[in-house]
Amino acid sequence: MLDKMRENAQSWVIKLLFGIIILAFIFTFTSPQGDSETVVAYVNGDPIAVDDFQRLLPRTANQEPDAKRSVLFQMVNMLLMEQVAKANGITVSDAELVRDINSNPQFQTNGVFDMDRYKALVGGKPERFEENERVKLLLGKFNRFAALPAQPSEPEIRSLFLWQNEQAVVEYTVISPADFFAQTESHDDEAQAYYEKNQARFTEPAKANFEYVAFTPAALAPGQEVTDQEVQDYYETAGATLVSQKRYEFRHILLPVGETPTQEDVNAIQKSMAEIQKRLAQGEDFASLAKRFALPGDTAPGEPIWMSPAEMPDELAQALAGMEKNTISRPIITQAGLNLVQLVDVELPRQMSLEEAKPIIVDRIAQEKAAKILGDKLDETISQMNQGVKLPQIAENLELAVKETGPMTREQLVEEFGLNAEAADTLMTLMDGNTTKTPLKIGNGGYLVASKIDDLPETVMPLEQVRQQIDVEIRRAKAQELALEKAQEVLVEGAKGQGDVLATYAPKLKETEPFVRSGQIAGLQVDPKLTSDAFTAKPGQWLPTPYSSANGYVVARLKETLPASEELWQQQKQGWAQAALEIYRREMYQAVNNSLFERANAKGAVELVRPDLLN
């Protein structure tokens, strides 16, 4: 359809008329009952083609039968809407179709419709594209037609606003599993059962050790000579682009924890940190405390150090980014332990001096030179490999460095070198002492030649080796159960209004900031169900269940609800009117959509011809 538009962008009228004739011919003379092999279903006699149905299926459809039914349901609904639209005199003229296609930015060059671009993007079947566009426009008109009755009144708009902007405040406490860890034990039979059930977790995967030569600009750069004049010329040309990183000068106190700390260890560290904070609050000098708590091997305890964010744990970098000079952070948890820092100074990014930039420039120039000889080195290596020369001798002949990977799994090879899966398999399946037949491409654009030294088969770590880890996990699970039981006790006694457990935890209740139904609770990462339950409770009532959070179980009671303010309503009234209109339109459209399908189904107007395609 619209061939003339595709052949000659200036001559629309002839083809528009021709398109109308084609459409009339199709709808007048085409039989409503086509070949059942090519039709998946009929809707009021109109077919849904198998090709169209299969084209819309997701790739995972064969594993998800519900996905097939969902696609067919959508196609039936769209055809029903199209039929109702036409029955009500809603049509799309050829002029509207042309205007829609002309105005589509993807078919334009410099804001003007481009016929060549259109042909290239639409492909060999523009008629299908144009008919699909016509249906989209028709359904858009139908949607607007169906939504015409959706006109919410001001009281309805205001009720939506009030519902959305009502706020709640809850009182809560967190019952932490850490408080119960010391009460738990791990017994031999439990550890044995846990070990047997989770043996896959304690299995060391197969590994292999390789010696290799990397052919990358970075690997070949050390052998390249770079003159001072080359460095000077580079700096004069591109020195403005060589900018230092932001750096922080700070003092640091670290209270380390072991790999598997007990609750007693955690309690001791927290107690020590609390004592340090107390002494700082009393005016003691941070530097002197840093010296007292310095770790063995610290060559300058208490002295400030300079580091960039990239050189430190993310948690420290984030804390320092929000601090002012001469202030002290809150305790910061990192993998190493509990940290406290004092910010001394900040150095902002600046252009590097020639002396500072020289190592960077030397490396860049050396890599540029190395990239030019990389191909030659690779060719020489392949030639010597074909002659049976061993890898260490090849490396010596070409003045290259041979490195050893150490034991690595297939996945570690992929991650470390950027190998694809096939190349990693090639390495893992090499026989001991054998070298890759050809260089393997690696992730940074270079190549790798490797020889296997030895294989380390998959092994299961003995129980004795992982017993400590298992004990900690068993005790954590038990502590979790005890915390949940205690949280449930609080709620039971809370409902009664008395009890020893309630008396213990009620004084610990904290109060949240006011929150709305659709928002998060500031400072409390908790199961979102707490939010919805808060708006169904009465003031003073405990919420019905403990809610999981990152730190344990939250028990809470509603303190109060706060209505939305009149001032906010006046500020947002216009926006809520538009939002309510969109909500009502969607609901009206969905109601019409559902009604059309239910009516058609009840009358037997939807006939499934190929149920086998849904299996």
Image: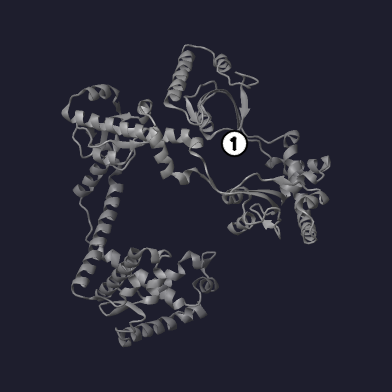
| Residue 326, percent from left and from top | 54, 20
Q: Residue at x 47, y 46 (%)?
A: 200
Q: Which residue is mark 1?
A: 310
| Residue 317, percent from left and from top | 54, 32
Can the viewer see residue 558 in this picture? Answer: no
| Screen quadrant of the N terminus | bottom left
| Residue 334, percent from left and from top | 50, 31
Residue 462, relative to residue 294: is it above or below? below
**Badge 1: few (under 14), some or many (20 or more) residues near its Cα, within 10 Å?**
few
Direction from residue 525 to residue 375 in the image, left or right:
right
* Residue farthest to the bottom, as pictured: 29
Can the viewer see residue 271 in this picture? Answer: yes
Q: What colouring style does the render use?
A: one colour
* Residue farthest to the left, as pictured: 496
Residue 70, relative to residue 542: is it above or below? below
Direction from residue 605 to residue 129 in the image, left or right:
right
Give whichever of 344, 87 is nearer the camera. Answer: 344
Q: Secondary structure at mark 1?
A: helix
Give whichever of 224, 202 is nearer the camera. Answer: 202
Q: Residue at x 27, y 72 (%)?
A: 80
| Residue 84, percent from left and from top | 25, 73
Residue 376 sits in which quadrant? Answer: bottom right
Direction from residue 102 to residue 374 in the image, left or right:
right
Q: Amino acid at mark 1?
A: Ala
Give whichever of 208, 56 is nearer the camera. Answer: 208
| Screen quadrant of the C terminus | bottom left
Total numbered badges shown on the rendered structure: 1
